[in-house]
Image (tube, helix red, strand yellow):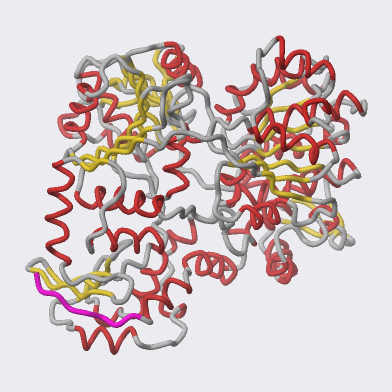
């Protein structure tokens, strides 16, 4: 039977007449039959491949045909900005079958929330953190609101799965399944990933209904246009952007909020109509920027990785990247933002600001040319999520049985057998430290939990990632955005006493700081501001590090490489003339010091550096590609040190900062918190592969 004919008749009518579609996209057709059959699924397609409609059209069909009562479908997004972006489109689709859509997140006011509770919509757009807030809220009857849930759509599921938010998401879904008293259909949406079957298995680990990956052959598209250039600095990048593709709509990706702000300021100084989008901007500021950019023609929007995740900013002419992303998957997401309009092709121009960034760009492109896409790997041993879930369950239920809490978290246990095996130790610690108390077999919330998480109605308990103290930046009655404590302190203590922040691409003079309410009052100024945010760069995989080694050994990346970039590649290769990363590592001796070039990646180099710590006086630095060693170290010394096959985990020194970066670590025994960090630092496959290679030497 024609898949389109299986959709609800009203949907069929509006798809043809209201949307004006001549036909469905391949994924949209392929997803209809398994979704209508109630199967769990992972729907895969490139950016702009119609994934949202592929999930929602058959879900609305089931909703209408089977008479699902509200609230029956949850649509979960990783960003509230994506919720806001999707709401008008899903509201229109739902109206085709006479259903209603609502949205719930931190920016939705109490009046709107109360209305949603009193009259639940048929489909609710939200985030996992907001779902957690609903479950533990004393103002919401979660059984009334969520007891009718039949299906859940998880947008950008790969973005959840690769972080602890994914484990939290699965745990919350188990609790909703328990409330509903039925297996809830799970539909994951993702762009291309390297291990789709494993990702689907993770999403449905406690489910019994059939599950399948739906990934039809993509529509034929033109070969993308890729260019690599070397510009040598952010001001030079701004100059190039101001002159490149004038009259066109350009999206520029950067990999930090600091650089987003600085580049926006540089572009505006060159009279380029520029907007900025990142997670620390105020809601209204961000919406204005994205709307203005969507409606403009000759303009630039500078964005962090948040704009990878499906937020619609209209048709783009050009995508540019300052330096390089840390994965092929991220590159594919970003380049997929272009080439959506008929007669255009996907494109990306890399503007690299350092030689190392240019090597990284070339390495990503070399990996891409081989067909490699990174597998999604959920973080190991999420035992701290168990601690969070126990506290949340006690809060949700007003107390829970010491032997029955596990019924809420799936069978098999949703966080995995390793976490299940230590659950007794976790509960003992929560009881002994006052996070929980027990009374005749019933677990209740203890004074320590009230003290640590009770602020703002336990809002901090709904999020599983840590964030530093945030101050709201307000100009008059308008919230410009937020700044972390580090950024505020940098502006307050800057030389000259100017007290000027750079935020939303503009400078703001600090008038007053309300330390108790965490509010900074500002006014616009022409003086140059200071910008600083906490954060860490994404780690390099072993495969990317090896690809960079291959580039330095002589393999050219695909696409157009500018003369400036070719010159930089030539200069870089002169320092690695004997390099063959596929068969050996390299001890490179230079006037500035010795370095062991492992090309092993971020996590592997943590252990490798620990293995040779006797050769690294004063704990010399190491990175994704190399490890600094003492000046007198030679190849024989290095070979003797790295040839040991003993377990190196006892050599790793875990700083308190590493453990403290793990949210809810204080609610765990220290040995369990250490185990989480050690498991997540490990890359035994890359370490073993590196240790198997002989060390060669080179003096430069």
- Locate residue 150: give its quadrant: top right
Using the image as rendered, state which of residue 307 and residue 260 is in the foreground: 307
The residue that appears at 46% across and 12% down in the rendered structure is 477
Viewer can see residue 111: no
Counting from the top left corner in percent of width and height, residue 241 is at 24, 26
Task: Work out whether 402 lies above or below 557.
Answer: below
Does residue 286 show up magenta in the picture? no
The range drawn in magenta is 693-700
Look at 37% across and 24% down and name the residue there: 276
Give the image location of residue 263, x and y in percent: 27, 29
Image coordinates for residue 378, horizontal then vertical, percent: 59, 57
Which quarter of the figure has residue 277? top left
- In the image, 225 versus 541, the foreground residue is 225
- Considering depth in this image, is 680 or 461 the residue closer to the camera? 680
For residue 419, say whether it is visible: yes
Instruction: Measuring from the top left, give residue 359's x and y in whole percent.
Output: 26, 53
Q: Is residue 609 above or below residue 398?
A: below
Considering only vertical position in the picture, is 312 above or below 421? above
Q: Main secondary structure of the magenta part?
A: strand
Q: Is residue 634 left or right of residue 164?
A: left
């Amino acid at each position: 039977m024609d898949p389109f004919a299986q959709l609800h008749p009203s949907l069929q009518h509006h798809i043809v007449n209201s949307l004006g579609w001549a036909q469905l996209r391949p994924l949209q057709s392929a997803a209809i039959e398994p979704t209508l059959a109630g199967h769990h699924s992972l729907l895969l397609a490139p950016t702009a491949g119609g994934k949202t409609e592929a999930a929602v059209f058959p879900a609305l069909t089931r909703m209408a045909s089977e008479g699902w009562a509200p609230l029956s479908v949850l649509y979960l997004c990783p960003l509230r900005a994506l919720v806001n972006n999707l709401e008008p489109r899903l509201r229109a689709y739902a109206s085709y079958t006479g259903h209603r859509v609502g949205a719930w997140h931190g920016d939705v006011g109490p009046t709107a929330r109360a209305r949603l509770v009193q009259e639940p919509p048929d489909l609710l757009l939200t985030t996992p953190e907001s779902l957690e807030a609903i479950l533990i809220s004393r103002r919401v009857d979660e059984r009334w609101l969520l007891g009718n849930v039949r299906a859940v759509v998880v947008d950008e599921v790969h973005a959840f799965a690769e972080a602890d938010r994914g484990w939290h998401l699965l745990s919350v879904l188990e609790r909703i399944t328990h409330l509903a008293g039925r297996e809830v259909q799970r539909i994951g949406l993702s762009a291309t990933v390297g291990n789709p079957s494993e990702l689907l298995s993770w999403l449905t680990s406690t489910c019994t209904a059939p599950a399948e990956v739906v990934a039809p052959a993509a529509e034929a598209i033109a070969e993308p246009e890729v260019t690599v250039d070397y510009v040598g600095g952010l001001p030079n990048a701004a100059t190039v952007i101001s002159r490149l593709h004038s009259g066109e709509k350009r999206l520029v990706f950067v990999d930090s909020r600091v650089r987003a702000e600085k580049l926006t300021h540089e572009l505006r100084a060159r009279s380029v109509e520029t907007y900025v989008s990142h997670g620390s901007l105020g809601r209204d500021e961000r919406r204005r920027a994205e709307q203005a950019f969507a409606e403009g023609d000759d303009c630039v929007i500078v964005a962090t990785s948040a704009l990878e995740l499906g937020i619609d900013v209209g048709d783009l002419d050009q995508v540019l990247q300052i330096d390089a992303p840390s994965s092929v998957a991220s590159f594919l997401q970003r380049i997929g933002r272009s080439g959506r309009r008929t007669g255009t092709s996907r494109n990306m121009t890399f503007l690299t600001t350092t030689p190392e960034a240019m090597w990284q760009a070339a390495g990503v492109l070399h990996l891409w040319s081989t067909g490699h896409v990174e597998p999604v790997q959920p973080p190991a041993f999420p035992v701290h999520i168990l601690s969070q879930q126990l506290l949340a369950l006690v809060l949700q239920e007003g107390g829970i049985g010491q032997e029955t809490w596990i019924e809420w978290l799936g069978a098999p246990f949703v966080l995995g057998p390793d976490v299940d095996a230590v659950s007794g130790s976790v509960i003992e610690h929560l009881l002994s430290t006052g996070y929980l108390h027990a009374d005749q077999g019933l677990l209740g919330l203890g004074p320590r939990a009230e003290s640590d998480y009770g602020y703002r109605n336990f809002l901090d308990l709904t999020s599983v990632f840590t964030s530093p103290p945030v101050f709201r930046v307000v100009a008059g009655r308008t919230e410009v955005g937020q700044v972390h404590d580090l950024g505020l302190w940098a502006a307050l203590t800057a030389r000259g006493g100017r007290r000027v922040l750079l935020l939303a691409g503009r400078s703001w003079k600090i008038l007053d700081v309300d330390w108790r309410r965490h509010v900074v009052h500002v006014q616009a100024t022409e003086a140059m501001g200071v910008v600083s945010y906490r954060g860490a760069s994404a780690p390099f995989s072993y495969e990317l590090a090896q690809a960079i080694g291959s580039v330095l050994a002589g393999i050219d990346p695909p696409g157009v490489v500018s003369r400036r970039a070719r010159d930089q590649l030539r200069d870089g290769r002169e320092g690695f003339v004997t390099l063959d990363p596929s068969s050996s590592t390299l001890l490179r001796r230079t006037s500035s010091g010795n370095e062991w070039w492992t090309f092993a990646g971020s996590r592997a180099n943590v252990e490798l550096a620990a293995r040779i710590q006797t050769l690294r006086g004063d704990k010399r630095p190491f990175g994704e590609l190399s490890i600094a060693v003492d000046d007198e170290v030679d190849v024989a010394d290095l070979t003797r040190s790295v040839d040991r096959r003993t377990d190196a985990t006892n050599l790793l020194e875990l700083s308190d900062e590493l453990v403290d970066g793990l949210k809810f670590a204080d609610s765990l025994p220290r040995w369990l918190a250490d185990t989480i960090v050690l498991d997540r630092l490990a890359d035994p496959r890359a370490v073993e592969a590196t240790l198997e290679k002989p060390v060669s030497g080179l003096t430069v």
